[in-house]
Amino acid sequence: MCRNMKLRIVRHGFTMIELMVVVAIIAIAAAIVVPMASSAGSMQLRAAVTMVAADLEYAKSMSISRGQRYSIVFNSTTESYRIADENGTTISHPIKGPSFPYVVDFRNDSRLNHVEIVSADFDDASAVGFDYLGIPYSVTGSPAALLEPGVITLQAGTATRTISVEPVTGYISISN
């Protein structure tokens, strides 16, 4: 019965190299997925801060190019802001057309509904305007140039970001 039978050893399992390749693939996938899994609120906050800064720049450039005063009026109660001309009339949105007023409403925009306007302070006013030179001014009573930097604070969850408008230069900056 012992007819030249060779014993074959069959091994079942994975080699160390195969295991290392799988671990490396999982690590790469995790490195890609984890940053994308950040909260919706923080992504909305980032978008809202960028949008407000861009709209401040837009109002400033409109003032310079047209030689008129334009202002941005913030309302923390309704979580919205609007761009107005020197008469206080809300201007039309440049892209949507003349039948759409330039109003940004965080509450009613599903892309920004986690964001709150905590405060907007421009020398004790909730609005900032720009004159024909792009110099920011406080829109209270008689307009006067800003004495201190104006600050808009936005919040989503526990994350807070601020946008500052410097007096005289109108330089707009974003900080955490």
Image (cartoon, rainbow, N blue to C red):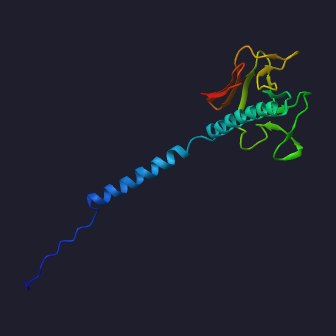
Q: Which residue is at the front of the view, 3 or 79?
A: 79
Q: Which residue is at the front of the view, 29 or 99?
A: 99
Please name the residue shown 87% across and 36% down the image: 91
Give percent across and percent down for residue 119: 73, 23
Please name the residue shown 13% across and 76% down the image: 7
> Image height check: is 26 above or below 3?
above
Outermost residue to the top = 147
> Image height check: is 53 above or below 126?
below
Q: Which residue is at the front of the view, 165 or 106?
A: 165
Residue 96 shown left or right of residue 5 in the figure: right
Residue 128 shown left or right of residue 114 in the figure: right
Residue 65 in sight: yes
Give percent across and percent down for residue 135: 76, 22
> Image height check: is 143 above or below 134?
above
Image quadrant containing the N terminus: bottom left
Give percent across and percent down for residue 100: 87, 43
Q: How many labels does the image show?
A: 0
Residue 171 shown left or right of residue 61 in the figure: left
Image quadrant containing the C terminus: top right
Please name the residue shown 83% across and 20% down the image: 139
Give percent across and percent down for residue 121: 74, 20
The image quadrant that residue 175 belongs to is: top right
Residue 80 in sight: no
Please name the residue shown 81% across and 25% down the image: 129
> Image height check: is 85 above or below 143?
below
